[in-house]
Amino acid sequence: MMPHVLTANRLSVGEVVYWSGSKGWVSRLNEAEILPDDKAEAALKGAAEWVEKREVVAPYLFEVRILGGTAVPVKTREAIRAAGPSVRRDLGKQAD
Amino acid sequence: MYRYDEFDAQLVRERAEQFRGQVARRLSGDLTEDEFKPLRLMNGLYLQLHSYMLRIAIPYGTLSARQVRKLAHIARVYDRGYGHFTTRQNLQLHWAQLPKVPDMLVELAEVEMHCMQTSGNCVRNITADHFAGAAADEIEDPRILSEIVRQWSTLHPEFSFLPRKFKIAVSGSAADRAAILVHDIGIQIVRNTHGEIGYRVTVGGGLGRSPFIGHEVGSFVAKTDILAFLEAVMRVYNESGRRDNIHKARIKILVHQIGPEEMRRRVEREFAEIRKSGTLELPEAEIARIAAYFAPPRFEELADESVELEAATRKNAGFADWLKTNVHAHKMPGYAIATVSLKRIGDTPGDCSSDQMDALADLMEEFGQAEIRVTHEQNLVLPHLRKRDLFALWQKLVPLGLASSNHGLVTDIICCPGLDYCDLANARSINIAQNIAQRFADLERQHNLGELKIKISGCINACGHHHVGHIGILGVDRKGVENYQILLGGSGAEDASLGEILGPGFDSEGIVDAVENVVGTYERLRQSGERFLDTYRRVGPTPFKDRLYAR
């Protein structure tokens, strides 16, 4: 099984965020905690607390591959969420 | 244009304040996401890939210069300086922030706009022919009925919890520029043998997972009866439409399952019942009151030929190209309609920046009776232009990047936001549109190919109308890789038809070659005067298939 990353959107501004463990919810995928299969579901359950606190909405897990120590999303959808629209490089996280 | 009365104005103002309260309760924790989601959707607010997306209703696609300036302002101040015009004649802002949305709604209300009817299982924003009130072939301005239907359907308590969303489109001409046959209800304004104007009503058209062409349920509904007739259709749907399966809940599935004959019988029965009470009879005076809002602007008496226009056409080849495709016949002598293409090669189809919107508002006031239309093909239309002003207008559109001479041609591609923005998408679509447009950028070749409508969707929900593209493209996710199916032979016009999948799909590069290939087959097989669609209909899929999949 592939490792996972836990993601959500910030409730107020809608921004894509990732669960980092120690630093809480972070903006960058490269700061996300890589969750091995046996920890992923527990992390997702833990996200309920942050939904309750109104920090984030719609948390879910997605699969990543580890390439050179970095998490790379398996699906294009998550690559686009992590960067921004592939047709507008001036927008989204890729532009920051 | 329609102007809000005190009730309309109060409604949209109060709606914005109501939503302010709902947002505050969500942010304070008084509402859970499950409780809040239907409330935000009722105001057109979705959570998408990167952020919240606000979908703004543009009833029957008509905007004033004041409204365009306000949209430019909202996009600039609250979003990222651009908006995306959709196939539903709406505008989407893709980077909204929840706490600021109530202010956006207040700003919209200031110019008689809102986000109602842009989501949820209600009657959605009423769409209409974008040439309304201007087309030479028009029987009656479809916006009159559209506005009546808008007022009847907005927050209609009986139709606020339908089995599924419900889309109504109105056309005022025999030529269908509003894709009425692929709507839940399509209304065509017709004239009977006595010269009276009435409505031909079709039901059960739609795209998405299960595409269907609508069936006629009323061949000539009298003007005063139209709301009773529509209500009859809605009641049959509300009572019998499926609620157990979201994929089978649209009225098209009901019509398909019981058959058009039975649908007609049920609608007739309900219609007779409603008529008995007489309460839904539309008073002539009310029709006249609404019609007055859409009275034509004051046209000058002009000769149809314009010396200035002819001189400019002779001198400037680029302008002549634009005239060929982007300028259309107006009902008044000396006037014309112009399509402002939002399909510049390499741009995102339907996107328009705040700066472009502001500049367009100026041009609307200078040349176009301060009015513009949004088309379901994701372009804009200036409906009332003096022919003698066309060259001056075109010269001002060129530096704005809004003068592409490609209306109806191979690069005038309809395209949904796809996986670059949309939470439902399985594949990107904008990049495919851009790459196809680049491939066919040569304008001489585009003009040589003639009318050729490519429509691209990034998922089966078909916001990009791929089923009714002469060439349709559907993006799917095949084992984690974007894959593109090609369909041929669709049409969303009065000769509506559904495209058929030609064969196995292609990757994102291969699909551009595939389009080139089928266009090449058309070039080889076409007879004089045939459009791509005509050739396809004459020869069928086999020659296209054989050449595309030849090893």
Image (cartoon, helix red, strand yellow):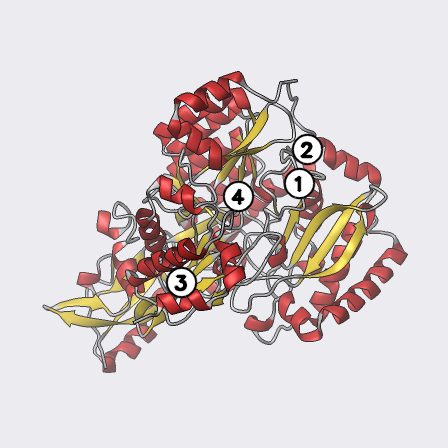
Q: Earlier in the sequence, mark 2 or mark 4?
A: 2
Calculate the distance from the C-alpha at mark 2 to the C-alpha at mark 4. Answer: 18 Å
Helix, strand or loop at disc 2?
A: loop
The subunit letter for the residue under badge 4 reads B
| Quadrant in the rendering for residue B123 | bottom right
The subunit letter for the residue under badge 2 reads B
The subunit letter for the residue under badge 3 reads B
- Residue B255 shown left or right of residue B56 in the figure: right
Question: Residue flagged by tag 1: what amino acid is it?
Answer: Arg
Q: Residues within 10 Å of mark 2 (few under 14, many from 20)?
A: some
Calculate the distance from the C-alpha at mark 2 to the C-alpha at mark 3. Answer: 38 Å
Helix, strand or loop at disc 3?
A: loop
Quadrant containing the N terminus of chain B in the rendered view: top right
Q: Which residue bears the numbered disc 1?
A: B143
> Marks 4 and 3: in contact by CB < 8 Å?
no
Q: Earlier in the sequence, mark 1 or mark 2?
A: 1
Calculate the distance from the C-alpha at mark 1 to the C-alpha at mark 2. Answer: 7 Å
Q: Residue at x 33, y 50 (%)?
A: B434
Q: Earlier in the sequence, mark 1 or mark 4?
A: 1
- Residue B195 shown left or right of residue B39 in the figure: right
Front residue of A47/A27: it is: A27
Q: Residues within 10 Å of mark 4 (few under 14, many from 20)?
A: many
Discs 2, 3: same chain: yes
Q: Which residue bears the numbered disc 2?
A: B294
Circle on res. B425: 3
Front residue of B345/A20: it is: B345
